Amino acid sequence: MSPPVAPPGWSRWLVPPAALSVHLSIGQAYAWSVFKPSLESALDLSGTQSALPFQLGIVMLGLSAAFGGTLVERNGPRWAMTVALICFSSGFLISALGAATEQYWLIVFGYGFVGGIGLGIGYISPVSTLIKWFPDRPGMATGIAIMGFGGGALIASPWSAQMLESFGSDSSGIALAFLVHGLTYAVFMSLGVLLVRVPRPAKTAADGTPAPLEGVQVSANSAVRTPQFWLLWIVLCMNVTAGIGILEKAAPMITDFFADTSTPVSVSAAAGFVALLSAANMAGRIGWSSTSDLIGRKNIYRVYLGVGALMYALIAWVGDSSKPVFIIAALVILSFYGGGFATVPAYLKDLFGTYQVGAIHGRLLTAWSTAGVLGPLIVNWIADRQEEAGKSGASLYGLSLVIMIGLLAVGFVANELVRPVDARHHVPAQKKKEAADVHE
Amino acid sequence: MSTSDSNPSGGGAAADGPVPDRRPLIVFAWVWVGAPLAYGLYELVQKATQLFTG
């Protein structure tokens, strides 16, 4: 499938909704927990078992983004969005069959394996195209799309819950809910497939052939051999670990923090805090990423990592003496977490050019998978050990906060070490010409 | 939308014939993704207010 080239007069403002239709759909992954209680009672599963489809889905996201990125670059965004649509929707349809026949392995395979491929390919599908359409504002453009991934859970969470309430939480109700999800997402994502276009390449004045790509261009295979790639890998991993550290344990954390005070936090207030963190996460994706277009990528990561560390220090220092300070600092940290995700494609474009930025982004997302394991592991393990040692309240998290500050400091140093990519890694002029020809 | 919103590389500048008005399509596309997002945000705000009332 050749990349769909925009006809004359095609507006670039049609590309962000195309990207959003995919990201708002696949962002459903973070609302998987809605199905867990129903699955556990209908199919007699443990909590660990019911989390399997989501966990496999996230693993497949990382793997398919890392290994499928080059294919996405070669075949273009429409191919990638079609693959994402087919895999993500089929995942739900296979899961519907699994629920209807009470074969749980089919749900794990469908949602986790097949759907997970849709997550990875869908996540990277619009990145490179958006950057090419918005060379003046790449941070804003990718921020819009990646904000959609956060927004997907906001939509799916209440929607799926209402569906289970209407259809029932038994196996046939779950099967019907999965079926409706699969069909609805197929229709919703089709907008992206139909609308997405790559920009028409500039022509050289002399013979009308496409002009070669300008500036620094580095292939995905060369990029992973540069220190810049691995420094950014560390930056993303540290930033995400620090954010997940709070996100994963937000509700018990705020409850524990103020348990020994005169104003303890109720269960419903803790749920409100979690919702507010989701809003900060989303706002950070579009807000901070757009800001990076004005102040530069390196500077915005200085803010994410430096001010993020200060916010963690503030929480550790103030302890349980001020609820507003705790809430505001946590919101700022979560906004930086979202911003870190959304800004990284533009940072990659600055360093490696647009040639294979989608594929490079896919490979960098392995940092996300690593952070997804590291962050919760640190906070949960330390909180458990502190509890065993007889500690309670804010002191349960003291050591975790110090470790998060340390991780952010490591990320800050890695960001400081980022320099322009050495010329020996650049794509030769002839290859730049061939790359431009691909879009013709 | 300004004319600079199309073809950032300038590759379409030499196109012949009238260019179709894309504004209705743009509105449709943004409503398509904006409506469910607004629903999600509404539900989020409802939940978030529990922090101050719960």
Image (cartoon, coloured by chain):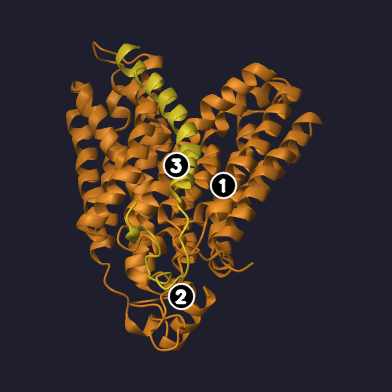
Chain colours: A orange, B yellow
Can residue A228 be seen by looking at this rendering? yes
* Mark before the other along the chain sequence, 1 or 2: 1
**Which residue is painted at 41% across and 24% down in the image?**
B42
Q: Position of residue A85 (x, y in %)?
A: 63, 48
Residue at the spot of label 1: A191
Q: Chain of mark 2?
A: A
Seen as rendered, the residue at the extreme right is A101
In the rendered structure, the answer to whether residue A314 lies left or right of residue B27 reads left
User: The N terminus of chain A appears in which quarter of the rendering?
Assistant: bottom right
Find residue B52 and report its image quarter.
top left
Q: Position of residue A328 (x, y in %)?
A: 23, 30
Q: Position of residue A354 (x, y in %)?
A: 41, 69
Q: Nearer the viewer, mark 3 or mark 1?
A: 3
- In this view, the residue in front, A209 or A387, is A209
In the rendered structure, the answer to whether residue A215 lies left or right of residue A151 reads left
**Which residue is painted at 57% across and 23% down in the image?**
A161
Q: Position of residue A284 (x, y in %)?
A: 31, 42
Q: Which mark is residue B27?
A: 3
In the rendered structure, the answer to whether residue A179 lies left or right of residue B16 reads right
Residue type (three-letter) at the residue carrying disc 1: Leu
Q: Secondary structure at mark 1?
A: helix
Q: Are marks 1 and 2 in contact (CB under 8 Å)?
A: no
Label 1 Cα crowd, 10 Å radius (few <14 / some 14-19 / many 20+): many
Tags 1 and 2 both on a single chain: yes
- In this view, the residue in front, A19 or A113, is A19
Q: Nearer the viewer, mark 1 or mark 2?
A: 1
Instruction: Measure the alpha-carbon separation of dots 3 and 1.
Output: 13 Å
Tags 3 and 2 both on a single chain: no
Tags 3 and 1 both on a single chain: no
Instruction: Measure the alpha-carbon separation of dots 1 and 2.
Output: 30 Å
- In this view, the residue in front, A407 or A121, is A121
